Each structure stands twice: as structure tokens, then as C-alpha cells.
Image (spheres, rainbow, N blue to C red):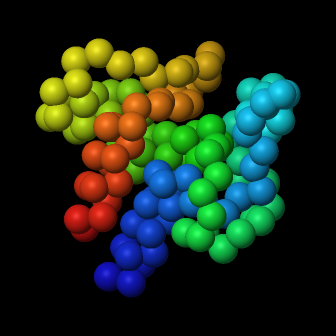
Amino acid sequence: MKGIAIVLTCFKNLLTMRHGLAWKQGPPFHYDWRRMFEKDDYVQFVLDKPMRHQPGTVWNYSNGASVLLGAIIEEATGYSYMDFADKFLFTPIGITSCYLGVQDRDISCTFTNVAVIQSLIDMVSSK
């Protein structure tokens, strides 16, 4: 059970953008977000980022966190990120239309919808 708790805690920290990564997201140049999309391997780019804070302590929006979530979901379930979100999240809570930003890669990158994010947090928190 301890291993599951650790995984759920990591997943929750990614969902809540309290991952601890040294990530620069915002304007004017979108720093790490732009640099990530220039790389061949998005996941490795994110994994190579150093930690700046203890996970769970500081909010820092990051497309990189969404990339890691997508990779985890795809590896663990065999579903694409979008298919997983549609089947287990969007459809059950009545969302019939959404956009999941997808680059020309295997991993779906990011989606932003406050209701969706909160639903995922609630799902993880209830475990």
C-alpha cells in the first residue's frame, strides 16, 4: 500500500501543479514550454528538469506536468491520453466537447479545463 500511496501522491502533485519542478512557463517567451516543444522527446525534457521545491508545496503551472500525466496514463492503461480522458472522465461527467492540445507526437500534451482538472483531483483524492 505504501507504494500506491507514493504513486497517488506524485500523480496528485502533477495534477495540482505542485510538482516541484524548476519550470518557467509564462510570457513573454514561454521559456520551458517552448523549449519542450522543440525537443524530440518531451517526456525526457521534463524528467531532466531539476527540482526547485519540495513536491506538494508550491503551485507552478507547467505544460510539462501535463506531458508527464499523459505519458503515465498512456503507459499504465494502454489508452491514448485523449481516449482515457474521454472514456473515464469527460463522458461520465457530461463533457461532450473538449480540446486536448496534441503535437505531432505519440503523447497528447495538455488540456485545460478547470472542471476537468478538479474532477481528476477529486478522483485521486478519494483513493
> Relative to residue 126, is residue 43 depicted above or below?
above
Residue at x 71%, y 58% (from the top left corner):
21
Residue at x 55%, y 41% (from the top left corner):
66
Query: Residue 126: x percent and y percent?
Result: 23, 65
Q: Is residue 56 left or right of residue 44?
A: left
Q: Is residue 26 left or right of residue 58?
A: right
> Relative to residue 18, is residue 94 depicted above or below?
above
Residue at x 25%, y 30% (from the top left corner):
90
> Relative to residue 55, is residue 63 depicted above or below?
above
Q: Is residue 47 visible?
A: yes
Q: Nearer the viewer, residue 108 or 65?
A: 65
Query: Residue 83: x percent and y percent?
Result: 33, 28
Asked which quadrant contains residue 30, the reply is top right
Q: How many marks?
A: 0
Query: Residue 81: x percent and y percent?
Result: 42, 33
Q: Nearer the viewer, residue 87 or 40?
A: 87
Q: Is residue 84 left or right of residue 15?
A: left
- The image quadrant where one finds the N terminus is bottom left
Asked which quadrant contains residue 104, the reply is top right
